[in-house]
Amino acid sequence: KMDFFTSIPTHIDYVGQAKAEKLYRAIITLFSIVGFVWGYIVQQFSQSVYILGAGFLLAAILTVPPWPMYRRNPLNWQVP
């Protein structure tokens, strides 16, 4: 039963870290701008907060798990 959990990869490489960081910054920036503009148009601050929250949720789903797209450039370790 525990073999399933230990077989799940829990790492990403350095290139994947850079990709994840760029992606979450872009998502949060985009959603914050859209949320601010939409909240201003409808005059509801809560709408801005909901849109920003959706952006945080999307960014977390796309960047927190070690998806295979973040593990494409593994480091080649050298034997000492």
Image (cartoon, grey):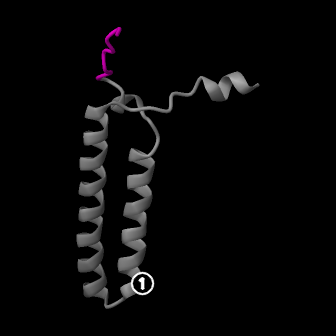
Q: Secondary structure at mark 1?
A: helix
Mark 1, other Cα within 10 Å: few <14 / some 14–19 / many ≥20: few
Residue at position x 24%, y 48% from top?
22
Q: Eyeballing the image, is 25 above or below 47?
A: above
Relative image position of residue 14 (x, y in whole percent): 29, 33
Asked if residue 13 lies left or right of residue 66, the reply is left
**Magenta residues, as a range?**
73-80
Relative image position of residue 3 (x, y in whole percent): 69, 22
Q: Is residue 49 one of those drawn in magenta? A: no
Dividing the picture into quarters, in which one does residue 80 lie?
top left
Is 59 in front, or is 21? Answer: 21
Residue at position x 35%, y 78% from top?
48
- Mark 1: amino acid: Ser
Q: Eyeballing the image, is 58 above or below 74?
A: below
Q: Quick one: which residue is furthest to the bottom in this view?
A: 43
Q: Eyeballing the image, is 66 above or below 79?
A: below
Is 52 in front, or is 6? Answer: 6
The prevailing secondary structure element of the residues shown in magenta is loop
Q: Eyeballing the image, is 30 above or below 63?
A: below
Q: Which residue is mark 1?
A: 46
Dividing the picture into quarters, in which one does residue 2 lie?
top right
Residue at position x 30%, y 35% from top?
16
Asked if residue 21 lies left or right of residue 12, the reply is left
